[in-house]
Every structure is written in structure tokens, then in C-alpha cells.
Amino acid sequence: MTTRDQVQAAYAEVARSGTSCCGPGACSPAATARKLGYDEADVAAGEGANLGLGCGNPTAVAELKPGEVVVDLGAGAGFDAILCARRVGPTGRVIGVDMTPEMLARARENAARLGLAQVEFREGVIEDLPLRDGVADVVISNCVINLSTDKARALAEALRVLKPGGRLRVSDVATTRPLPEEARRDVAAWTACLAGALTIDEYRAILEQVGFEAVTIEAQAGFGVDDLLQGPDPIAQGVSPALREAADAIVSVRVSATRPATACCAPASSAGGCC
């Protein structure tokens, strides 16, 4: 079973159980969302779609405007997509992409229940998005790019589907120094959004390599590795001692970048970037 298969199986179980959290108290989905910076209106609007996943709130910094098109990479049960839909309004459009059928089923049910006709969810992987070139004003993602085993390809795909001048706004996990190799091989730590994390410098370099500009990566206080490890199997249990010992290097980050306003001379999906 590949790393992707194992990650998919873990998140399918979360979709079936309805939460990644341990109960109704401090680590309930609502409490986790508040800790990540979602306000009470967001928590209420996303009821049923919030599974306690994520490591930030990309919708708060996406600067969304009515009528814009948003693509959500790794949309899960649709929490962020639903919030984006309310911001872009009925003249806008939100396309959530996820590789896990169980998550997609929940997301579609949630959008239908809320009557959000401007939202759709497509099955696919972030390294090969089921979208045409230049469709999005904004690409968001919440704690998903770290799960990719080919991050350069995933970020090149994000660039490809953005319009010239479009915005990338991502919440993710990164590290302040390289993790030990033993920790990198820890599958439980991959599914917990830890072992697959890039260093901040690696993240910035890949974004610039594939063609993004105006790249900023900021560490976020208030949410850390202990929060990511609080959930039950299959997401957090069994993480190796090597990973736990390196926990001080793991941080939640806010990533912002822009696709250049000038046209690319080669497809962004080639990972060759723009001229």
C-alpha cells in the first residue's frame, strides 16, 4: 500500500466517523475551529462539514470578493468550501477537490443541505487537478499539501489552474529544520500531517521554482503539533518517538503567493515555472 493509499484510508475513516477529535470538549471540531481562528458565525455555518481537521483558516486571508472562483485543494467534508461560497455569493463559484470518496459524499450532502448551488466537489488528486487551465481567482488549501508525496507537482498544478494574477492562500504544516529520516518514514506521522512537512525554506523554494511570486510564509502561533496529535486512530496514534522528539521543529504556517500577471510561456504543470 502506498503512502497515498494509507492517507486516503485514514481520512475515509474520519469521514465515516464524522470527526477527527476525541469528543465534545476541548478538542471537539467546533473548539478546534475556534482555535484555528474561525469565528462563531463560521463555526455555525459549517456545522456538519467541520470534522476538526485543518491547521489554520485560509478563508480568513483569501480576500474573497463576490463573483470570484475559488478552488479548494483537499476539500474534505466541505467546511472551507462552504465558507468560501458564502463570501463569493451566488455569482461566484467554488470547486472542492478531494481524493477520498467518503469525504466527497459528505461534502456534497452538506452543500445540498445548505442550498449552495455555487459549490461543486470533484474527485481527484492535487498533483493532477481535474480542472482546466486558468479557472480560479483563488486557490486555497488547509493542511493538505504536506500530505502530498510530490509537492512540486501539486504546487505547479495550483499555479496552472489560477488565472494570471490569481492568489494562492494556504494553511499548512512546515518545519524549521529537517526532520530525522526515521520520522520521515513514519506513516502514522504522514497521516497526522507531520512527517511529510517541508522546511519553510524548501516550501518557499518550490513555490518560486514553479513560478509563483510575492511568496510569504508566516509561522502561526496558537496551534501546534500537540493539536495535530490529539485525535484517535487512524490519524494520530502510533507516531514514532523520533517524530515526537522533533516536535519543536513543526509549526503551522500561513502561505501566500501570486501567479504572475504575465502569461506563462510553458504549461505550469511541467513544473518549469513561468518565464
Image (cartoon, rainbow, N blue to C red):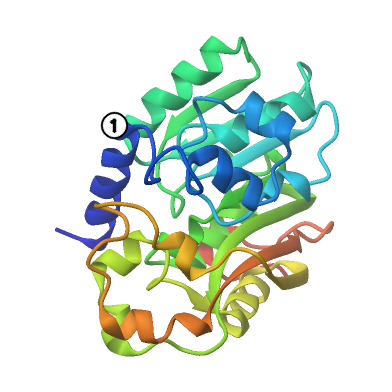
Q: Is residue 130 visible?
A: no
| Foreground residue among 153 and 48 | 48
Residue sticking out furthest to the front: 25
**Residue 82 percent coordinates (x, y):** 62, 28
Q: The N terminus appears in which quarter of the rendering? A: bottom left
Neighbor class of circle 1 (other Cα within 10 Å; few <14, some 14-19, many 20+) is few
Q: Which residue is mark 1?
A: 16
Compared across the picture, whether 38 is left or right of 236 comes to right
Q: Residue at x 68, y 37 (%)?
A: 70
Q: Residue at x 81, y 39 (%)?
A: 64
**Tag 1: residue type?**
Arg
| Quarter of the rendering containing residue 204 | bottom right
Q: Residue at x 64, y 71 (%)?
A: 207
Q: The C terminus appears in which quarter of the rendering? A: bottom right
Count the labels in the image: 1
**Residue 145 percent coordinates (x, y):** 50, 60
Compared across the picture, whether 38 is left or right of 23 comes to right
| Quarter of the rendering containing residue 3 | bottom left
| Foreground residue among 231 and 274 | 231
Q: Secondary structure at mark 1?
A: helix
Placement of 134 over or under 267, stated as above or below? above
Q: Residue at x 51, y 84 (%)?
A: 249
**Residue 16 percent coordinates (x, y):** 28, 31
**Residue 66 percent coordinates (x, y):** 84, 27
| Foreground residue among 241 and 179 | 241
